[in-house]
Image (spheres, rainbow, N blue to C red):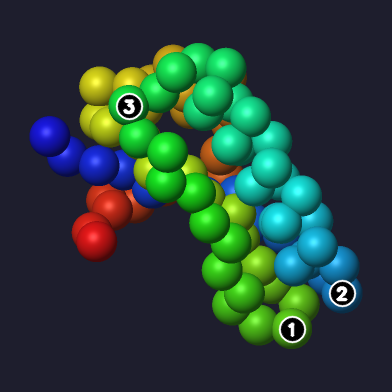
Amino acid sequence: MRKLKLIWDFRGPDAKKIAEHHEIHLKDFIKAEQLALDITGVEVLSEMHAVAFMVVTEVEMKPIRDALRPHRGQVYSE
C-alpha cells in the first residue's frame, strides 16, 4: 500500500509556530476520523519557511485532500 505525504506550507517569521499549531489540528483530525496512519510532523526548511505534514494511505487520500486542502503532496518514503 502506497503512502502519500500531504503538505501545508507556511511562510514568514512565524512559519514554524504556525506549522506546529497546524500539526495539532492534523493530529485531532486523525483521531476523529480514525485514520489508518498517524504520522505527522513539522519541517523547518528555512528561517522563513516551514511545513506541516501528514501521511495517508493512497486509498484515504482523496477524501482527506478534499476536506483539508493541502498545498501539495508527494509519495512518502520512510
Which three-letter amino acid code belongs to the residue tagged 1? Glu
Asked if 2 appears above or below 33 in the picture, the reply is below
Q: Residue placed at 28% from the left, 53% from the top?
A: 76
Tags 1 and 2 touching, CB below 8 Å: yes
Q: Look at mark 3 in the image and give the residue it sits on.
A: 36
Asked if 55 appears above or below 59 in the picture, the reply is below
Q: Look at mark 2 in the image and give the residue it sits on.
A: 13
Element at badge 2? Answer: loop
Rendered location of residue 74, percent (x, y) = 34, 51
Mark 1 crowdedness (10 Å alpha carbons): few <14, some 14-19, many ≥20: few
Q: Residue furthest bottom?
A: 47
Asked if 67 appears above or below 21 in the picture, the reply is above
Q: Gap in Å between the C-alphas at discs 3 and 2?
A: 34 Å
Q: Which mark is residue 57?
A: none
Q: Residue placed at 69% from the left, 36% from the top?
A: 25
Which three-letter amino acid code belongs to the residue tagged 2? Pro
Element at badge 1? Answer: loop
Element at badge 3? Answer: loop
Which three-letter amino acid code belongs to the residue tagged 3? Ala
Name the quadrant of the N terminus: top left
Q: Is residue 41 visible?
A: yes
Q: Residue placed at 59% from the left, 36% from the top?
A: 27
Q: Look at mark 1 in the image and give the residue it sits on.
A: 47
Rendered location of residue 73, percent (x, y) = 41, 47
Q: Gap in Å between the C-alphas at discs 1 and 2?
A: 7 Å
